[in-house]
Amino acid sequence: MMESTKHIKANQNLLLKRYKMLIEQAYNFRQTDSALSDISEFKAIKLLHKLNKLKYLNRDVNMIQQH
């Protein structure tokens, strides 16, 4: 159980790092290439969705561990 929590946290950190990079990339492309900006932003939104799923899973694991 503890191993899965560590795995979820590690995955969250990786996705968060990638999310921030994509958001920054989208911002930087905004003035020069709107298509690339939109693609980066779309990928960031997909990662944010995955992050929210992991956050939910981690909450469930923590609740199970407390009981």
Image (cartoon, rainbow, N blue to C red):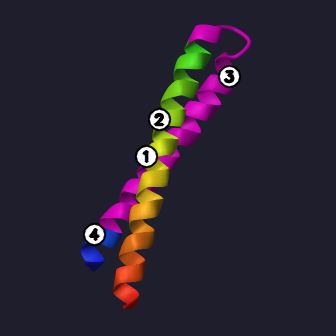
Residue at (55, 32) in percent of width and height? 22
Relative to 5, is 50 on the left or the right?
Answer: right
Mark number, residue 46: 2
Q: Residues within 10 Å of mark 1 (few under 14, many from 20)?
A: some
Residue at (47, 50) in percent of width and height? 51
Q: Residues within 10 Å of mark 2 (few under 14, many from 20)?
A: few
Circle 1 is placed at which residue position?
50
Asked if the residue at tag 4 contacts the one at tag 1, i.e. Cβ–Cβ closer than 8 Å, the answer is no
Q: Residues within 10 Å of mark 3 (few under 14, many from 20)?
A: some
Asked if the residue at tag 3 contacts the one at tag 2, i.e. Cβ–Cβ closer than 8 Å, the answer is no
Q: Is residue 6 above or below residue 19?
A: below
Q: Is residue 46 above or below residue 50?
A: above
Mark number, residue 4: 4
Mark 2 residue type: Lys
Give the mark, 2 or 3, whose residue is nearer the N terminus: 3
SS category of the residue bearing label 1:
helix
Label 2 and label 3: CA atoms lie apart by: 19 Å
SS category of the residue bearing label 3:
helix
Asked if the residue at tag 1 contacts the one at tag 2, i.e. Cβ–Cβ closer than 8 Å, the answer is yes
Mark 1 residue type: Lys
Circle 3 is placed at which residue position?
28
Label 2 and label 4: CA atoms lie apart by: 22 Å
Q: Quadrant of the C terminus?
A: bottom left
Q: Is residue 16 magenta?
A: yes
Label 1 and label 4: CA atoms lie apart by: 16 Å
Of discs 2 and 3, which sits in the foreground? Answer: 2
Mark 4 residue type: Ser
Q: Picture coordinates of residue 58 (x, y %)?
A: 41, 68
Give the mark, 3 or 4, whose residue is nearer the N terminus: 4
Mark 3 residue type: Asn
- Span highlighted in magenta in the image: 6-35
**Nearest the camera: 52 or 38?**
52
